[in-house]
Image (spheres, rainbow, N blue to C red):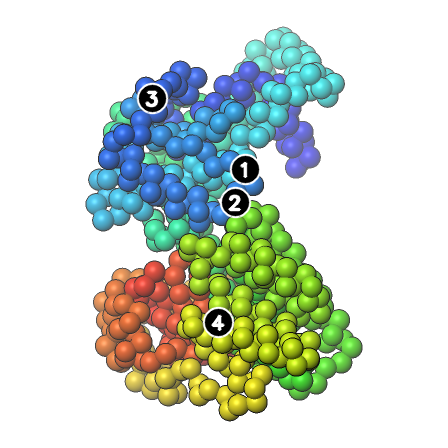
């Protein structure tokens, strides 16, 4: 059955090249308004209005968050034509947003930027996922022998069906439904991947896609049942389902971040890898590579790994090493390099991937290439938002010098570590300098004094949730299961990772709108400085595309930028 369907699917794609080409000009609008791109002119490309400035800011954040610069970023304009938001494919790809659609997004008040990000993320996803490729391929390669044969076959089927009007109607209806089904599937994908793009750009989870569609239909005075398109009710239902898939997608992503924070790197790697199967960005590739490298670090002995590398979040040294461990860590490091290369291929100016690749090469005993990627490539890219990478570049270069085991190398390493200490807030440079010079190690960088026994969420301490009730389950792979209690409390959820059917980590997390506070008075919306004042320096700081994770011995604060978005109580088995 599947093979028959696929053959007919391809047949209809090539047998109707004119239709495919028409659709490629104003491809896949969120709601079906008349395409205007063929008539697009300078008068339709509006930039000198406040609406454009606000929308452009959101648009640029989305493009930066996607981090895929292999292809030109589409130009962006506001238009007053009767369209919602569409892509014009051509020599210069262009995305248009109508002023009417902009005002619909504005009607969401405090959520207006999130609505705008959702709408523009939807269109950008069509572009990055190459949804126009199929129709354009069919049109541009219509002269191929296989195309002509399929075209003739389709015409013959229509001619034969002429003897039976009922069959002919069914065949043509089938052709139409195939196109509608394909378009609907890509709309659904753009809803949830576009929503994830908006989330990763810092706009949170916009879960009102169905309401946005409802308001767009009303603003554009559209017929709820437009021929050739799913009905308004079906489109809203698609958006609701996509919102649920987006929630699952974000939950898996956040769980991967939390697992990284508590040192379960192998499990985090598997969660990130599931994200990569559907969504590719430089940050995700970098995170996958970093977790592979962190797994490898655990397979070095203390004698082999004297210094702390800038990528480390937590280092648990192996007491000894065998040939099997050496082979395993080599595989992990080589895999990490490939993931960092993938991140770099998306954005050649992404400094973290260059620095992480340099660390992996150093651990692979390739100091020449490691020095090149750190001192040349990572340094070149460490400008603007990546300036914080500079001290870590100096730290790695210092480690490479120290590993030469020469007096000259020791002096150069000392100079590098001292230079890094002027801007390094992590304490890593001071730690490595103490090791190099044989001085006592600096005291722990954390003010964490142990378990915060009074901590609870929704009136429940960690002890109260150790034997969870589960209402939602997802298989990550053949080893891991991700389970949740989505209503652990009135304002909280429980997230559990099982490895080989045994609990490995449990997180009790507040919802983003949690009205309560921690045992030390921290609430949603408090600043990072307020957290540090009450809890001291964290054990670890984990940087994510949307902010930071501040990990203490029992509590993790999830930051949106510099503000508390939520917090978690956790235990690792």
- Where does the image place residue 506, in percent across and percent down from the top left? 45, 74
Residue annotated with mark 1: 71
> Which of the 4 image quadrants contains residue 3?
top right
558, 390: nearer the viewer:
390
Q: Residue 420, which numbered label? A: 4
User: How many marks do you count on the picture?
Assistant: 4
Label 3 – label 1 distance at C-alpha? 24 Å
Secondary structure beneath label 1: loop
Residue annotated with mark 3: 44
Q: Residue 68, which numbered label? A: 2
Residue positioned most to the bottom: 440
User: In terms of sequence position, does the residue under pointer 2 or pointer 3 come before the other?
Assistant: 3
User: In terms of sequence position, does the residue under pointer 3 or pointer 1 come before the other?
Assistant: 3
Mark 4 closeness class: few <14, some 14–19, many ≥20 residues within 10 Å:
many
Contact check, label 3 and label 4, Cβ < 8 Å: no
Secondary structure beneath label 3: helix
- Where does the image place residue 168, in percent across and percent down from the top left? 58, 14
- Which residue is painted at 78% across and 77% down in the image? 323
Label 1 – label 2 distance at C-alpha? 7 Å
């Amino acid at each position: 059955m599947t093979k028959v369907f696929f053959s007919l699917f391809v047949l209809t794609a090539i047998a109707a090249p004119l239709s495919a080409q028409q659709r490629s000009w104003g491809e896949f609008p969120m709601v079906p308004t008349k395409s205007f791109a063929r008539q697009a002119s300078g008068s339709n490309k509006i930039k000198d209005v406040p609406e454009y400035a606000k929308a452009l800011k959101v648009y640029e954040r989305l493009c930066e968050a996607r981090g895929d610069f292999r292809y030109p970023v589409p130009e962006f304009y506001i238009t007053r034509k009767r369209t919602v938001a569409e892509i014009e494919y051509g020599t210069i790809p262009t995305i248009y947003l109508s002023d009417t659609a902009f005002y619909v997004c504005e009607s969401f008040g405090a959520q207006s930027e999130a609505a705008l990000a959702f709408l523009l993320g939807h269109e950008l996803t069509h572009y990055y996922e190459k949804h126009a490729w199929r129709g354009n391929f069919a049109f541009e390669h219509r002269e191929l022998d296989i195309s002509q044969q399929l075209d003739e076959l389709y015409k013959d089927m229509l001619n034969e069906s002429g003897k039976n009007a009922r069959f002919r109607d069914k065949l043509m209806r089938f052709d139409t439904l195939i196109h509608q089904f394909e378009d609907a599937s890509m709309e659904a994908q753009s809803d949830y991947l576009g929503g994830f793009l908006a989330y990763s750009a810092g706009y949170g989870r916009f879960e009102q896609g169905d309401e946005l569609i409802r308001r767009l239909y009303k603003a554009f005075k559209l017929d709820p049942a437009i021929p050739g398109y799913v009905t308004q009710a079906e489109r809203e239902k698609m958006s609701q389902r996509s919102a649920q898939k987006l929630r699952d997608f974000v939950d898996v992503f956040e769980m991967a971040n939390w697992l990284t924070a508590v040192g379960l790197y192998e499990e985090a790697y598997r969660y990130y890898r599931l994200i990569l199967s559907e969504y590719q960005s430089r940050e995700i590739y970098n995170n996958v590579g970093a977790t592979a490298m962190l797994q490898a670090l655990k397979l070095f002995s203390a004698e082999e790994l004297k210094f702390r590398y800038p990528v480390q979040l937590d280092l648990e040294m192996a007491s000894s090493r065998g040939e099997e461990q050496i082979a395993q860590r080599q595989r992990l490091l080589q895999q990490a390099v490939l993931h960092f290369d993938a991140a770099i291929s998306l954005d050649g100016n992404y400094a973290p991937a260059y620095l992480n690749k340099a660390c992996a090469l150093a651990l692979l005993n390739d100091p020449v290439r490691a020095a090149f990627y750190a001192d040349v490539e990572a340094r070149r890219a460490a400008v603007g938002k990546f300036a914080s990478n500079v001290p870590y570049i100096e730290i790695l270069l210092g480690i490479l010098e120290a590993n030469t085991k020469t007096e000259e190398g020791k002096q150069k390493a000392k100079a590098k570590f001292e230079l890094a200490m002027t801007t390094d807030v992590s304490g890593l440079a001071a730690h490595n300098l103490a090791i190099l010079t044989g001085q006592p190690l600096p005291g722990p960088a954390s003010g964490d004094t142990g378990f915060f026994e009074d901590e609870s969420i929704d009136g429940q301490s960690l002890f109260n949730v150790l034997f969870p009730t589960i209402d939602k389950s997802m298989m990550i792979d053949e080893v891991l299961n991700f389970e949740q209690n989505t209503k652990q409390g009135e304002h909280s959820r429980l997230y559990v990772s099982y490895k080989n059917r045994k609990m490995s980590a449990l997180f009790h997390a507040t919802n983003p709108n949690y009205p309560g506070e921690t045992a030390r008075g921290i609430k949603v919306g408090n600043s990072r400085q307020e957290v540090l004042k009450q809890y001291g320096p964290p054990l670890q700081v984990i940087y994510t595309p949307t902010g930071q994770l501040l990990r203490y011995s029992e509590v993790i604060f999830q930051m949106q930028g510099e503000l508390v978005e939520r917090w978690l109580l956790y235990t690792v088995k």
